[in-house]
Amino acid sequence: MRAQEIALARPLLDYLNGRNDVNLVGPGDAELRAPTIALRHSEPGVEVAKRLAKHGIMASGGNFYAWRLMEALGIDPQHGVLRLSFVHYTSPEEIQSLIKALDAEL
């Protein structure tokens, strides 16, 4: 299961690391993280998540009850982050759909 999560995360992290308009929270290496990815963007995470829903992408935005952590990372908890999560049974095609939706909405 872990190997599959890493394989799924790699293209997404490669895509995100190649963008200059988002900041990945946490390591950019798929082997060093869980398949829950938080992004800082100039827009509040909840606003981006709403737009991704139009593409059939379920994402979340907010501070996820991590107010003090957000502040320690220099992120305004009111602004929050965009959170993307997946697991081993997510398909590679679903990751590609996510990347296309992010490309359209960021």
Image (cartoon, grey):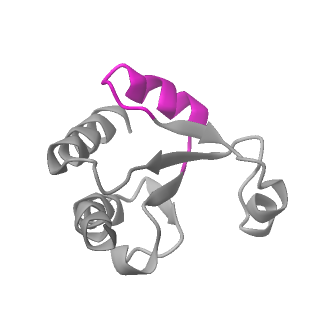
Residue 8 falls in which quadrant of the image?
bottom left
Q: Position of residue 47 (x, y in %)?
A: 55, 29
Residue 19 image-quadrant placement: bottom left
Q: Position of residue 21 (x, y in %)?
A: 43, 53
Quadrant housing the N terminus: bottom left
Q: In the rendered picture of this protein, how many numbered marks are placed on residues? A: 0
Image quarter where the C terminus lies is top left
- Percent across and percent down for residue 28 are 40, 74
Left/right placement of residue 76 relative to residue 4 reads: right
> Does residue 67 appear left or right of residue 90 in this picture?
right
Image quadrant assignment for residue 87: bottom left
Relative vertical location of residue 23 with respect to residue 89 in this rendering, above or below: below
Q: Furthest residue to the right?
A: 68
What's the magenta region? 40-58
Q: In the image, is 85 to the left or to the right of 14?
A: right
Q: Is residue 71 left or right of residue 83?
A: right
Identify the residue at horizontal 80%, vertical 61% (top origin).
71
Q: Is residue 3 magenta?
A: no
Q: Which residue shows up at 74% across the image and 59% down it?
A: 70
Q: Residue at x 73, y 64 (%)?
A: 74
Where in the figure is residue 80, as x and y percent of width and height? 67, 45
Q: In the figure, 94 relative to 8: above or below?
A: above
Extreme residue toward the front, this view: 1
Which residue is outermost to the top? 54
The residue at 49%/33% (across/down) is: 48
